Image: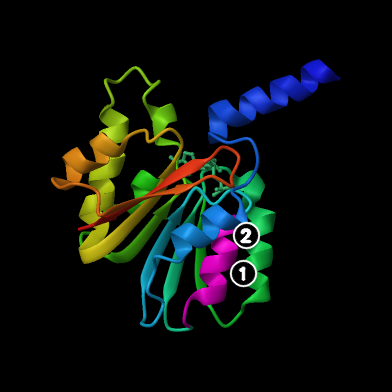
Amino acid sequence: MAINFYRKIKRSIQEDGLIVSSSVFLVNSMVGKIDFGRALRILEIGSGKGPFTREIIRRMSPDSQLDVCEIKSEYNPWIEELMAQHPDKQVTLYNGCVTELLNNADYYDVIVSSLPLKNFERMKDQNAFLYRIIQGFRFALKDGGIYLQYQYFRSNKADIETVFGKVMDEVDFVPLNILPAFVYSMTK
Ligand SMILES: C[S@@+](CC[C@H](N)C(=O)[O-])C[C@H]1O[C@@H](n2cnc3c(N)ncnc32)[C@H](O)[C@@H]1O
């Protein structure tokens, strides 16, 4: 039984990059950086069971649009329940790799990413996939749009700065999360 538990945790870290869902402190730190006072096109990537999705849907105006991208369809019931609770909000759920949603230039006002960027470094492609994803974020963001990303251990900050060609606008530390996390804010 202990071995099964250990295997589950190991799989969760390797595939999803986390042990438990993000805390309310991390969610509020990240979502609190979004100005919901106007109509927004928002892309949320890597929703999992939806800790960020819940708060974004709650705060967004009815004339805003939220695209939720999650590669694993096993999380659909959680997201679909949130969508059902807010029929007045415009939310679309996509199951697939986020690269499929990054083809329109200057499209999103806000990108909220929980992607475990650090995990992509393990791929044997000299970080080509990692860079394709970050370049895709920059391409899909409107000028003045904001890319929000959390990471543990300050990882991949330099990669994001290289692609955006500037230093990070803000880095916040949220200790009350498993694991403690850094929140990156990068405007285009
Ligand atoms: C660290 S978890 C975050 C879950 C949740 N947002 C949270 O903070 O608790 C990362 C999520 O990204 C998803 N994911 C990984 N690679 C992806 C990709 N290429 N496109 C879309 N989602 C992906 C995983 O399935 C996982 O649910």
**Which amino acid type is shown beneath numbered disc 2?**
Ile
Task: Name the foreground residue: 175 vs 66.
Answer: 175
The kind of secondary structure element at disc 1 is helix
Across and down, in percent, residue 69 comes to 47, 53
Residue 122 location (% of width, % of height): 40, 20
Nearest the eye: 41 or 118: 118
Closest to the observer: 154 or 38? 154
Which residue is under mark 2? 79
Image check: 23 left or right of 56? right
Q: What residue sits 79% from the left and 20% below the top?
A: 4
For mark 2, give the secondary structure.
helix
Q: What residue type is labelled 1?
A: Met
Magenta segment = 51-61
For marks 2 and 1, give the CA distance.
Answer: 6 Å
In the image, residue 137 sits, relative to residue 67, either above or below, namely above
User: Which residue, given by chain and number where applicable, does mark 1 sit on?
Assistant: 83
Task: Classify 10 Å Cα crowding around label 2: few (below 14), some (14-19), many (20 and above).
Answer: many
Residue 137 in the image, given as x and y percentages of width and height? 28, 50
